[in-house]
């Protein structure tokens, strides 16, 4: 059975897509810690990040390096934090989160509630800032 991320990649579940290439897909987290919280996933369904082959792992990290500056240009923050938890969905993924302090990466805190227009505007802004 496909993971929820595979279904998003296939377009079976709608998402606020930021970017994609042959190997990777980026979209806004719908339960964000901060505005601009973005998930990056390989298109190949592999459960655990460290089980990715070296080429796909490298591609995912380079993809993150491309997406992070666009988020930073769109959402005021000190930095873009990166987290790999790997427990929520059995599909390797990276969280890119705009942060001002280390506490901003506390996944136990309440998530933001954004409306569709806020998500759409954030996604459009990040896409516009991609180099």
Image: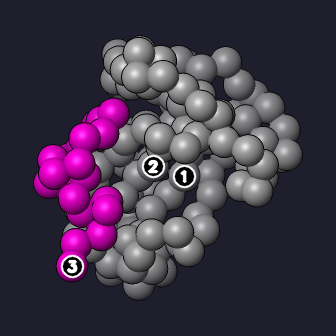
Q: CA distance from mark 2 to mark 1?
A: 5 Å
The image quarter in which residue 128 lies: top left
Q: Earlier in the sequence, mark 2 or mark 1?
A: 2
Residue 47 seen in this snapshot: yes
10 on left or right of 107: left
Q: Which residue is mark 3?
A: 1
Q: Is residue 41 above or below residue 55?
A: above
The image quarter in which residue 130 lies: top left
Seen from the viewer's position, the closer of residues 42 and 33 is 33
Q: Are marks 2 and 1 in contact (CB under 8 Å)?
A: yes
Secondary structure beneath label 3: loop
Residue 114 image offset from top left, x and y in percent: 54, 26
Q: Are marks 2 and 3 in contact (CB under 8 Å)?
A: no
Give the residue at x 56% y 74%: 87
Give the residue at x 16% y 51%: 12
Q: CA distance from mark 3 to mark 1?
A: 23 Å
Residue 115 image offset from top left, x and y in percent: 48, 22
Secondary structure beneath label 2: strand
Q: CA distance from mark 2 to mark 3?
A: 21 Å
Q: Which residue is mark 1?
A: 95
Give the residue at x 39% y 64%: 58
Give the residue at x 24% y 63%: 6
Q: Which residue is mark 2?
A: 39
Residue 80 seen in this snapshot: no
5 on left or right of 72: left
Image quadrant where one finds the C terminus: top left
Secondary structure beneath label 1: strand
- From the viewer's perspective, is the residue at label 3 or at label 1 nearer? 3
Q: Is residue 89 above or below residue 32?
A: below
């Amino acid at each position: 059975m496909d993971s929820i991320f595979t279904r998003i990649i296939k377009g079976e579940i709608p998402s606020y897509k930021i970017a994609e290439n042959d190997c990777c897909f980026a979209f806004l987290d719908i339960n964000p810690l901060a505005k601009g919280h973005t998930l990056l996933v390989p298109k190949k369904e592999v459960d655990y990040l460290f089980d990715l082959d070296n080429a796909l792992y490298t591609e995912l990290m380079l993809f993150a390096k491309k997406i992070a500056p666009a988020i930073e240009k769109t959402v005021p923050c000190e930095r873009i934090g990166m987290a790999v938890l790997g427990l929520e969905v059995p599909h390797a993924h990276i969280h890119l989160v705009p942060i001002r302090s280390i506490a901003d990466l506390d996944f136990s805190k309440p998530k933001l509630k954004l409306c569709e227009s806020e998500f759409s505007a954030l996604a459009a802004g990040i896409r516009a800032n991609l180099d």
